[in-house]
């Protein structure tokens, strides 16, 4: 059997990533971004496994990527390049379990260990990237916690 060479920057080929998701938990970061009025940013997920639900921005940590670098990269990828250095505060460690994977394949579960971070910064939702999310909105935490369109894992951040 031929070995697949390691990918640069901790990014796997799609087939290798599918196998990794089958066998291992993924470590990710969720971004709880709060504006000056106390509203939080959610985006309408464009991709599985939480496709079609409102979710906080976030992303996976790559192998050999220090946490600080991962946080910086995910903030840049999810929120755009014009962010100043932020004072992110840890909100805790969570677990997310899905019955599907990144390709939307039912019966192929995904397990995330999630490091949640919170910061305050107001952004114009029109300037945010439309790659992982189809749109964005700012809402108070209590509204997010009660909105049936918000994914239960995101709701949990605001029900504590």
Image (cartoon, rainbow, N blue to C red):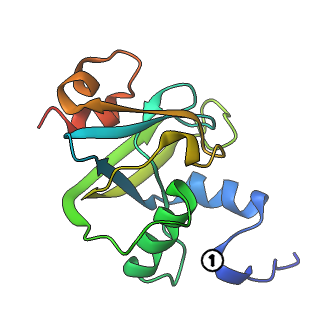
Question: Could you tell me which secondary element the residue under label 1 belongs to?
Answer: helix
In this view, the residue in front, 108 or 85, is 85
Estimate how packed mark 1 is, as few (under 14), some (14 to 19) or many (20 or more) residues with alpha carbons within 10 Å.
Answer: few
The structure residue drawn at horizontal position 81% and vertical position 77%, both measured from the top left corner, is 4
In this view, the residue in front, 17 or 68, is 68
In this view, the residue in front, 42 or 121, is 121
Q: Which residue lies furthest to the left in this view?
A: 160
Q: Residue furthest top?
A: 148
The structure residue drawn at horizontal position 39% and vertical position 28%, both measured from the top left corner, is 151
- On the image, numbered disc 1 is attached to which residue? 10
Q: Is residue 149 visible?
A: yes
| Residue 126, x across and y down, in percent | 56, 40
Q: Is residue 20 above or below residue 94?
A: below
| Residue 108, x across and y down, in percent | 60, 39
| Residue 117, x across and y down, in percent | 28, 59
Q: Is residue 99 visible?
A: no
* Left or right of 136 in this view: 5: right
Residue 137 found in image quarter = top left
Q: In which quarter of the image is the N terminus?
A: bottom right
The structure residue drawn at horizontal position 21% and vertical position 32%, both measured from the top left corner, is 141
Q: In this view, does 157 lie above or below 91?
A: above
């Amino acid at each position: 059997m031929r070995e697949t060479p390691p990918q640069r920057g901790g990014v796997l080929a799609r087939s290798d990533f599918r196998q990794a998701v089958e066998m291992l938990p993924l470590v990710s970061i969720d971004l709880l971004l709060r504006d000056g009025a106390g509203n939080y940013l959610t985006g309408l997920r464009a991709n599985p496994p939480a496709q079609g639900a409102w979710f906080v921005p976030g992303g996976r940590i790559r192998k050999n990527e220090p946490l600080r670098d991962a946080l910086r990269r995910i903030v840049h990828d999810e929120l755009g390049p014009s962010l100043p250095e932020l004072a992110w505060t840890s909100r805790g460690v969570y677990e997310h379990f899905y019955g599907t994977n990144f390709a939307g394949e039912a019966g192929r579960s995904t397990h995330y260990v999630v490091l949640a971070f919170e910061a305050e910064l107001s952004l114009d939702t029109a300037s945010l990237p439309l790659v992982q999310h189809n749109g964005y909105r700012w809402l108070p935490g209590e509204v997010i916690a009660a909105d049936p369109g918000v994914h239960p894992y995101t709701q949990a951040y605001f029900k504590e």
